[in-house]
Each structure stands twice: as structure tokens, then as C-alpha cells.
Image (cartoon, helix red, strand yellow):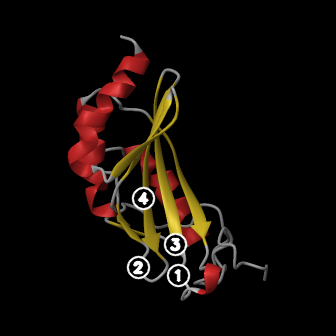
Amino acid sequence: MNTYINLQDMEPLLAPVTERFEWRDDYRLDANLRPDKLLAAIQTLQRAGWHYLSAITGIDVPPTSEGGDAAQEGQIELLYHFCSGPATLTLRMHVPYSHPVVPSVCGLIPYATLYERELIEMLGVEIEGTPSKERLLLPDDWPDGVYPLRKSFTGL
């Protein structure tokens, strides 16, 4: 099966749970969605044969006050990268600093626990229903509420 054709076919399948699509190039498609649609999107991908989650990336998007407008709250951008051959389909969503919560995907993809634990301790994202919240990277005596991948982190 041609992977590129399969990637194009994903737009109509994901449309019910996606707010918008962005083509990055011929082999990269981003599906922007709300966190409450994450599990439905992954189930759709799995039914279509996209079973390989290659990574979950978290990006800190700090607060801004550009253009004199009222400051916007900071957010964590979450990217769930699925691969099939040369094609990458990314589920992209934002969660605010005030409520950085997403559901666990471990019920669908058990090995995602490593990525989820990294999001918890490095960016302060709460993963509802994750099977393990044990430390993965930071020492046990690391202070609570200090997230080293947030741009506000200046060291201890």
C-alpha cells in the first residue's frame, strides 16, 4: 500500500474529531484537536492501520503580552507522532498552564507510559489514568512543581 495515499485518506477519517489539518509537506500531516478527542483520534488511527506511536513531544509555549493585548496564559503543546513508512501523522493539541490535563493513551498503546511519565515530570502535564507516575528521569528528591523543560526554569 502506498503510504502517501494512506496519509491523504486520514483527513476524512479524522475529520469528526479534528479542528483543522495542516500539511507540513507531502509526507507530514498535523491534525489539530482538543484533548478530549485524543483517544477517539488514536482509535481511528489504529483502525486505519497506524499502530506505531514513535514519540510524544511536549513544548512549552509561555505566556505572552504581544501587541499591547492582555497577556495570554501559557500553554503546553502536545504532539503525538504516528509513523507509517516515510509518513508522519501528528495529533497536535494545547493545554493551558492552569489545567494541563490529558487522558492517558496507555490503554490503547501500553508502551506510551514512558512518554507520559516524561510529560508529567518534565513539563507538569497531568495524565489522567496513566498506569504509573513514578519518576523516570529526575531524582526522587527533585522538588514538586519544578519542571525543567518549562522555559521559566532557571535551575535550582
Residue 94 percent coordinates (x, y): 44, 64
Q: Is residue 78 left or right of residue 104?
A: right
Which quarter shows the N terminus?
top left
Pointer 3 or 4: first along the chain: 3
Q: Decide: few, some or many residues near mark 1? Use Cα within 10 Å; few <14, some 14-19, many ≥20.
A: few
Residue of label 3:
75
Q: Is residue 19 visible?
A: yes
**Callouts 3 and 4 close, C-beta under 8 Å:** no
Residue of label 2:
99
Q: Which mark is residue 72?
A: 1
Q: Whole-Å distance between the Cαs marked 1 and 2? A: 14 Å
Q: Nearer the viewer, residue 42 or 113?
A: 42
Give the structural element (helix, strand or loop) at label 4: strand
Pointer 3 or 2: first along the chain: 3
The amino acid type, in three-letter code, at marker 3 is Gln
The amino acid type, in three-letter code, at marker 2 is His
Residue appearing at x 27%, y 62% in the figure: 36
Pointer 4 or 2: first along the chain: 4
